[in-house]
Image: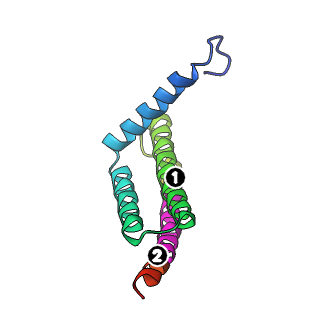
């Protein structure tokens, strides 16, 4: 709903549909979302192969969800910046770079967490 608008909020299901529409758009138009989904699939396959316990599944799923969420937020920020500043502006570029850096840092720490979780599971399974 637009602030100041007299229109009613969309229904829960309509809002859910908008969210799915946004996710579908991001998946079809953003390369990095596809990379993140590939990483998620890889983590799931590794988890299944290593037969990790529920706590490890929770860590893996939370980490993957956080990365996907961060990438979606980064895409939203970039879209809004492009809307309000269609021509190049140093501050617009800085905002986009900072949002990308946030995703990069999260991915770095999630990668480390994945190595710890899956690595310890591999050690337990094979040694």
SS assignment for the magenta stretch, majority: helix
Residue nearer the viewer, 10 or 73:
10
Residue nearer the viewer, 26 or 82:
26
Badge 2: how crowded within 10 Å, few (<14), some, or many (20+)? few
Question: What residue did someone put label 1 on?
Answer: 70
Hey, which residue is sitting farthest bottom in the picture?
127
Q: Is mark 1 on a helix, strand or loop?
A: helix
What residue is shown at x 35% (from left), y 43% (from top)? 27
Question: What residue did someone put label 2 on?
Answer: 115
- Kindly check if marks 2 and 1 are in contact, taking CB atoms under 8 A apart as contact: no
**Residue 35, above or below 73:** below
Q: What element carries label 2?
A: helix
In what quadrant of the picture does the C terminus appear? Answer: bottom left
Q: How far is disc 2 from disc 1 in space, using C-alphas? A: 20 Å
Q: Is residue 92 magenta?
A: no
**Residue 28, above or below 117:** above
Residue 113 appears in the picture as rendered:
yes
Q: Does the magenta stretch include residue 106?
A: yes
Badge 1: how crowded within 10 Å, few (<14), some, or many (20+)? some
**Residue 26, above or below 95:** above
Give the total of numbered labels.
Answer: 2
In what quadrant of the picture does the N terminus appear? Answer: top right
Q: Position of residue 56 (x, y in %)?
A: 53, 67
Q: Where is residue 21 in the image (x, y as percent from the top left)?
A: 41, 31
The residue range painted magenta reads: 97-117
């Amino acid at each position: 709903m637009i602030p100041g608008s007299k229109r009613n909020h969309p229904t829960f299901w309509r809002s859910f549909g908008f969210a799915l529409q946004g996710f579908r758009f991001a998946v079809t138009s953003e390369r990095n979302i596809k990379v993140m989904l590939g990483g998620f699939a890889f983590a799931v396959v590794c988890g299944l192969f290593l037969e990790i316990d529920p706590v490890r599944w929770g860590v893996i799923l939370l980490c993957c969800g956080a990365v996907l969420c961060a990438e979606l937020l980064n895409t939203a920020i970039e879209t809004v910046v492009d809307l309000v500043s269609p021509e190049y502006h140093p501050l617009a570029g800085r905002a986009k770079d900072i949002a990308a850096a946030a995703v990069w840092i999260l991915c770095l720490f999630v990668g480390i967490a994945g190595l710890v979780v899956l690595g310890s599971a591999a050690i337990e399974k094979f040694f």
